[in-house]
Amino acid sequence: MQLRGAQQTLLITLYAKALDNRSAQPLLHDELADEIVRRIDYDFGRFPLNPGQIAGIALRAKVLDDWAREWLAQHPDTIVLHLGCGLDTRVFRINPPADLDWIDIDYPEVIQLRRELLPERYGSYRMLAVDASDPDWLAPIAGGRPALVISEGLFPYLGEADARDLVKRVIDRFPRGEWLCDIYSRFALRLLRRSWVARSTGARFGDWGFDDPRQMEDWHPRLSFVDEPRLGERPEVQGLPARQRWLYRAYDRWNWLRRLGRMARYRF
């Protein structure tokens, strides 16, 4: 595999979802991720994931999946733009109708790996091998309909100007939609730059962030913050060990903790 820097972090999230699937009480039930990990000739042991990190990655994906299902149920004419998709199996987990336009978007090396490792999917599904911060990739994509944009784990690797420009271009292209993402504070990204994630992959993280999810509203006049999940109240969390349940309840209660990293839903 010819993955470099931030591209290698897709293996961390893939591995976490596989480990979650092997646990006694999976949160995400991503059997395909587990299957892919077993097929890849790679030393995943270099990623020292602990149970809390495994659950956190799986729960983040589950929240975004559920939000996506809600939007798609109400807007069947949507186009889905899955930015920085990595090896995520979201389109298989959600399994939308074959005629729904879904585009998985990532660097050419990553898309090639997806073609090699993931099952072929028919209908209106396609993959786009581009850098999401490239200003030209949207040009051939028809607007004039609702859009669901999912950018899980993307913003930390972009500069602030690139992230802002990406949001502006996409929203300008479509009349309405939702944007599902995870956002981090500047302090959280500083911690990530010193973490084993950065050391083991060479990934470089941005030096900007949000302390309040409403700050992202300043990026476009049509963008508005909708909500963030109450993780401690989610049914999946109730089966976790007591310490992890307590941490998720604390996360809901203390805003300073949520500032480190949170999932957010926006509408435009």
Image (spheres, grey):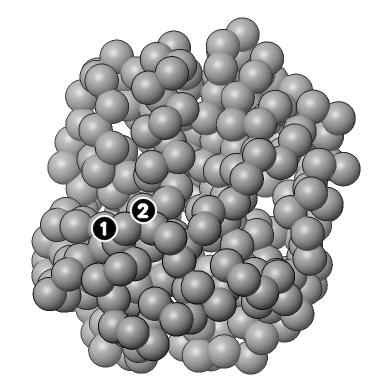
Q: Residues within 10 Å of mark 1 (few under 14, many from 20)?
A: many
Distance from the alpha carbon under mark 1 to that under mark 2: 6 Å
The residue type indicated by label 2 comes to Lys
State the residue in front, 5 or 31: 31
**Helix, strand or loop status at disc 1:** loop
Indicate left or right for 85 with 22 as reference: right
* Vertical placement of residue 108 versus 54, above or below: above
Which residue is the site of mark 2?
Answer: 62
Location of the C terminus (image quadrant): top right
Residue shown at 25% from the left, 20% from the top: 97
Q: Position of residue 141 (x, y in %)?
A: 55, 19
State the residue in front, 123 or 75: 75
Q: Are marks 1 and 2 in contact (CB under 8 Å)?
A: yes
Indicate left or right for 13 with 159 as reference: left
Task: Choose the circle earlier in sequence order: 1 or 2.
Answer: 1
The residue type indicated by label 1 comes to Leu
**Helix, strand or loop status at disc 2:** helix
Which residue is the site of mark 1?
Answer: 28
Q: Position of residue 154 (x, y in %)?
A: 58, 56
